[in-house]
Image (tube, rainbow, N blue to C red):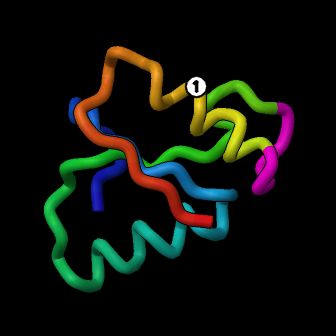
């Protein structure tokens, strides 16, 4: 699965393990690449963990640059 896209739909995950699981599931089931998977660190947090994910989730909800936001904890 190609990991670059111009979409504005985001799936926020707790860390790199979750990110890789999502990409593997998408590839295995041939899902279309219509969203970007992001971790807290990729959005400016100091570490990937549940607390930081919830903090950046609140900020992401207010952003003007997305059409959809999902979260996996």
Q: Residue at x 46, y 21 (%)?
A: 62
Picture quadrant where residue 23 is located: bottom left
Q: Residue at x 54, y 64 (%)?
A: 72
> Which region of the structure is painted magenta?
46-51
**Nearest the camera: 6 or 11?**
11
| Vertical comparison of 61 with 57: above or below | above
Q: Residue at x 65, y 69 (%)?
A: 17
Q: Residue at x 14, y 62 (%)?
A: 32
Label 1: few (<14), some (14–19) or many (≥20) C-alpha neighbours in 10 Å: few
Secondary element under disc 1, as helix, strand or loop, is helix
**Where's the C terminus, which quadrant?**
bottom right
x and y, in percent, of residue 30 in the image: 17, 76
Q: Which residue is mark 1?
A: 59
Q: Is residue 67 left or right of residue 17?
A: left
Picture quadrant where residue 1 is located: bottom left
**Nearest the camera: 50 or 7?**
50
| Vertical comparison of 71 with 57: above or below | below
x and y, in percent, of residue 71 in the image: 50, 56
For this orientation, the residue located farthest to the top is 64
């Amino acid at each position: 699965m190609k990991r670059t896209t111009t979409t504005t739909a985001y799936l926020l995950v707790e860390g790199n393990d979750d990110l890789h699981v999502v990409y593997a599931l998408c590839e295995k089931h041939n899902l279309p690449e219509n969203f970007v998977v992001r971790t807290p660190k990729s959005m400016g947090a100091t570490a990937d963990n549940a607390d930081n994910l919830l903090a950046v989730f609140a900020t992401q909800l207010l952003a003007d640059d997305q059409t959809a936001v999902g979260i996996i904890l």
